[in-house]
Amino acid sequence: MESARPPAPRVISELPPPRPAAGAPRNPLLATTISTRRPVIAASVPPLGAAAKNLGALLTRSAQRARRVGGTWVSDAASAVQRARSTVDAHDAWVPAQLREKISPSALIGVALAGVFVLSAVTFKLTTSALEARADSVAQRSSAVAAAPAAGVSDPRPGAAQTPPASAPNESSATLPAAQAPLAAAPAAIPTITDEGALLLNSAATFLNEERAGEAVTLVERALLRSPELRSDPRVGKILLRAANAEEDATSKAAFGLLEGPMAESGAELLYELSQDRSAKDAARRRAQSWIRSKQFAKAAPLPLYTLVRLRSAKTCEDKHALLGLAQGGGKPTLEYLKQLQARSTCAPDDLVNCYPCMRADTKLVDTIAELERRLK
């Protein structure tokens, strides 16, 4: 049995073609096409280069002229062209050598930017025309609205007053068309806040007479919120003083809340009156006396009442004497109290407590009484 023989080596009958030299085209057809078209391309480059250079120069001159007369945005466009040309000149290696010899790269960039320049000019013109048309339309409508009242045209706005047309001299309204007849009388006016306050106070007085003081205080509170000037109304003081003496604790507290707060100066005067009323309930009287010694009273009380309370609450003759200057702003109650001090300026042998001998040290008390009498005449 014959042993297996190894396969014979393959014989290469053809060797691959040699590699083309560096720079030579690998495709023979491409090389043939380039060699055939080269004269045509070379003949076309000079005219194209000359035209591009002329166009670039023209655009540069146009940009300079526009920069002088066009404004800020044209100046910016011209600056952009110059920057583009500088950039291309600094990187002229990007342009093929054949074209670089024939065509200026700056001219090519100028052609591109020229399109942007023309498009911006067209957009500006269209926008200006639209704005002018809109302004004319608004002016026409404004003229029509201004002339409408004079022509007797009704204002289309809801609730707007209608202006009747001017009638001829001695023209009777009976002969006017129906559209120009006088308007009917306006409906009755809505009650004012003052009328509402009067209604509330009348209802509160009715509740008070029916021994419903709590409901009366509620109506008075609303009246004061709606019309604060009612604080000086005598009906309000009468209702609140009776409610402050009510048997119901809630009603009394509600009345004191109004007297000490929203009633302001009027409330301070009413509470002082209550503190001096011996016929009032003890609880109500003590609460009023406590309040007129508080800081709230000092802030709310008018000057004549504040002066009187300060004089009465001063404990010593010297303290009262120091307040005589403030007493010149007092009222009739202050004048009466000063006359009481004058009558007690000399102490009796059996009463050395209820007297004020320091008032005789000068004429200040006499002068204050004379000033008050002169002012209060």
Image (tube, rainbow, N blue to C red):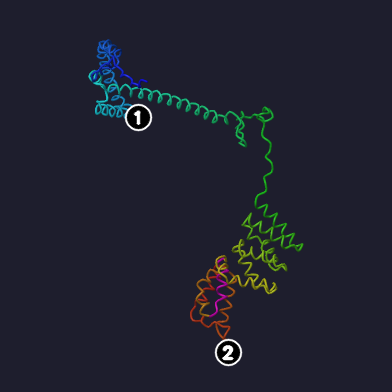
Q: In this view, does 268 lie above or below 356?
A: above
Indicate whether 76 appears above or below 31.
below
Specify the principal SS of the magenta part. Answer: helix
Q: Quadrant of residue 102?
A: top left
Q: Mark 1 points at which residue?
A: 73
Residue tagged by mark 2?
Answer: 349
* Label 1 SS: helix
Q: Judge the density around disc 1: few (<14), some (14-19), many (≥20) Cα neighbours within 10 Å.
A: few
Which amino acid type is marked by label 2? Answer: Pro
- Report the quarter where the C terminus lies: bottom right
Specify the segment rendered in magenta: 302-316
Q: Is residue 58 left or right of residue 224?
A: left
Residue at 56% across / 78% down in the picture?
Answer: 341
Q: Identify which residue, 144 or 150, lies in the foreground.
A: 144
Looking at the image, which residue is at 60% across and 29% down? 153
- Image-quadrant location for residue 197: bottom right
Where, by quadrant of the figure, is residue 148 drawn? top right
